[in-house]
Image (cartoon, coloured by chain):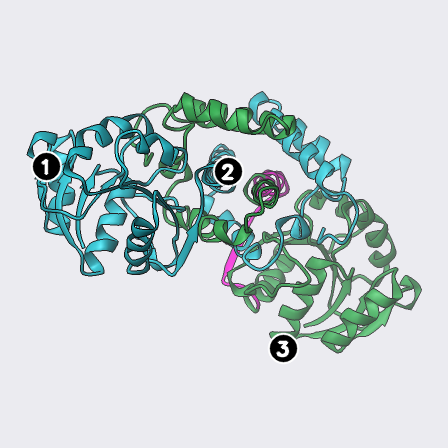
Chain colours: A green, B cyan
Amino acid sequence: MRITLIGSGNVATHLAAALKNAGHRIVQVYSRDAQHAALLAYHVGAEAIDNLATISPDTDIFIISVKDDAIIEMVKALARYQKIIVHTSGATNLKDLLAFTDNAGVLYPLQTFSKTKEVDFWAVPLCIEAANDDIKTDLEKLAATISNNIYHVNSADRKILHLAAVFACNFPNYLYAVAQQLLAGHQMNFDMLKPLILETAQKVQTQLPASVQTGPAVRNDVVTMNAHLQMLKAEPYWQEIYTLLSQGIIKNNNGGHRDK
Amino acid sequence: MRITLIGSGNVATHLAAALKNAGHRIVQVYSRDAQHAALLAYHVGAEAIDNLATISPDTDIFIISVKDDAIIEMVKALARYQKIIVHTSGATNLKDLLAFTDNAGVLYPLQTFSKTKEVDFWAVPLCIEAANDDIKTDLEKLAATISNNIYHVNSADRKILHLAAVFACNFPNYLYAVAQQLLAGHQMNFDMLKPLILETAQKVQTQLPASVQTGPAVRNDVVTMNAHLQMLKAEPYWQEIYTLLSQGIIKNNNGGHRDK
């Protein structure tokens, strides 16, 4: 397909690379920041533009991968070309696009992307939603060229998924940061925790998280929890997190078999 | 070495298997639960005992891997044999053992173990502490037969490490459970989140967690955060967690480059 990328952030960058590798032609990359557009366009052999007036109509699909609050503005500018327009956002309704175009869809990659780290796109779950069956078929075909994990998810469920991803990704990463800072404060190397972090994530690939919960809270080991709170007394914010999450684990642990 | 395992829980089980595989002889496995002792003893070719009076003195080291509050009781019973006695606990001081024996040490594996999942023990960080240089040498030699990651960590630092592990492992696992429950409540499959969970853990193997933080909080995307809180209104406890951890991310994000 001929593809136009609107945006040059983390999602746009990884998506563009995967699409290019799959043999699609990236026609243009738009960013309001000309340098960002140029960098990504260079990598995928596309034309860089920083002005929506220079959009080429010789494309099959516009993929909008910009901040949520800028999506509609892009849709308004692109609707006149009567091509498929999709966004890549977890939190934006398909309905919001339908006010401006019938050719609307969603291609939401459920993954965390960093510009500095490559991702195996084949393993990335791609959540599709489409305004009609034709677009649905087009998006299924397009998605199948870059991912093995295609899901049909409506806007309401996609929002739930996006929220769940905050709990499963953004919050754990923040807790890794707390752990790293805790060790750094005592001249210990974060490397020591890395195998533990990886194993914790690997465990839930095959088992339900609640069934493999470990640690003082799930054992209701009050002595250790109190000692930990005492150790955190210089960091009341971390104390608060410790208490709240430990209570959550205790609430969750309503009997049954657990690996404590 | 001739090794006696005191305990038959997750740590004892994985440690016993790794030691057995490394060619050591597991002499006895003690558990106050005869069936647990028998099961682990069977797997590692040892004698099972459920009575400390039947401990064999023909061993080189006692490895105590029981609940923290039962460790001292075991040390008291074993000190008379004048062998090396180590515990595997993150939270227990070496000093607590020295009240009963001079031949004391610590062998703390910094990993989360489940009986139902194998672990590559070579990658497990083993934290060593010893009462004297002879025992230190013995523990270094023993540790080197089962792990490539050996650290010397004193009791104060080991407690910090144990606390950091709660943030890096136990709490993220709990948040995975929340995400799984959120999806289950909307008939969505936890499988969709698994690549994201794994990638989040893999990212911090090579980069500092704070530098790869993503999500609405680090972007200070108030609209999305408010929408998420609204979606959680039936679960005030999860709302509280969402608010506290989002505020933590915002506090942490004091400028500098971030992958948002």
Residue drawn at 56 percent across, 42 percent down: A179
Residue type, mark 3 in image: Gly
Q: Magenta stretch: give its range.
A: A146-166
Q: Quadrant of residue B145?
A: bottom left
Question: Which chain does the residue under circle 2 lie in?
Answer: B
| The N terminus of chain A, quarter of image | bottom right
Query: What residue does disc 1 label?
Result: B55
Mark 1 surroundings: few (<14), some (14-19) or many (≥20) residues within 10 A: many
| The C terminus of chain A, quarter of image | top left
Dot in front, 3 or 1: 1
Question: Which chain does the residue under circle 3 lie in?
Answer: A
Tags 2 and 3 on a common chain: no
Q: Is residue A228 visible?
A: yes
Q: Nearer the viewer, residue B185 or A171?
A: A171
Residue type, mark 2 in image: Ile
Confirm whether the magenta stretch covers residue A151: yes
Dot in front, 2 or 3: 2
Query: What residue does disc 3 label?
Result: A23
The tag on residue B160 is 2
Asked whether the beta carbons under mark 3 and mark 1 sit within 8 Å of each other, the answer is: no
